[in-house]
Amino acid sequence: MSEPHAPDGDARMLWTDDVLRYRDTDANGHVNNAVFAAFCESGRVQFFRTQFGGGVQPPGTFFVVARFAIDYRAELHYPGRVRTATWIARLGRTSITLRNRILFEDRIAGEAEAVCVLLAQDTRRPVDLGAAAREAAGRFLIETP
């Protein structure tokens, strides 16, 4: 995964907030690595619900995560809050690549990338994003090298 270069104040980023829970910690005393994936899931779900609801994606379709990768930058410790930024890094014919940046106390704790493929409910095969989804996605596209 290449380095995301999106500036944190960019209006094309959607921000979600999560509270660290005691149960998120592991035997090493820090927040378990799997919890980072949950923060990204929160951002991804919120992104699709708020930006792709209301008939933007073709009827009878849904997104699935085809690939997911996380780069861990810093430990997290309970208690606290994290903010997760979500934006579109690439648009494919049948897919959208989302990037996440997880912030804890104004420092980057993790960065992730998810390739989300649009599938038809009936065939379970990839389908074209369509004009409406491309137009909506374009508002959140921050291309990275």
Image (cartoon, rainbow, N blue to C red):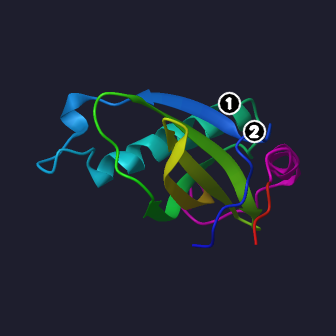
Q: Say which quadrant the C terminus sits in.
A: bottom right
Q: Secondary structure at mark 2?
A: loop
Q: Is residue 25 something that shows in the picture?
A: yes
Mark closest to the chain's N terminus, 2 or 1: 2
Residue 31 occupies quadrant: top left
- Where in the figure is residue 3, as x and y percent of width and height? 63, 67
Residue 128 among those drawn in magenta: yes
- Where in the figure is residue 70, as x and y percent of width and height? 45, 62
- Where in the figure is residue 142, as x and y percent of width and height? 79, 55
Which range is magenta?
Answer: 120-141
Q: Nearer the viewer, mark 2 or mark 1?
A: 2
* Nearer to us in this view, 3 or 61: 3
**Residue indicated by mark 1:** 50
**Residue indicated by mark 2:** 9
Q: Is residue 13 above or below residue 6?
A: above
Q: Amino acid at mark 2?
A: Gly
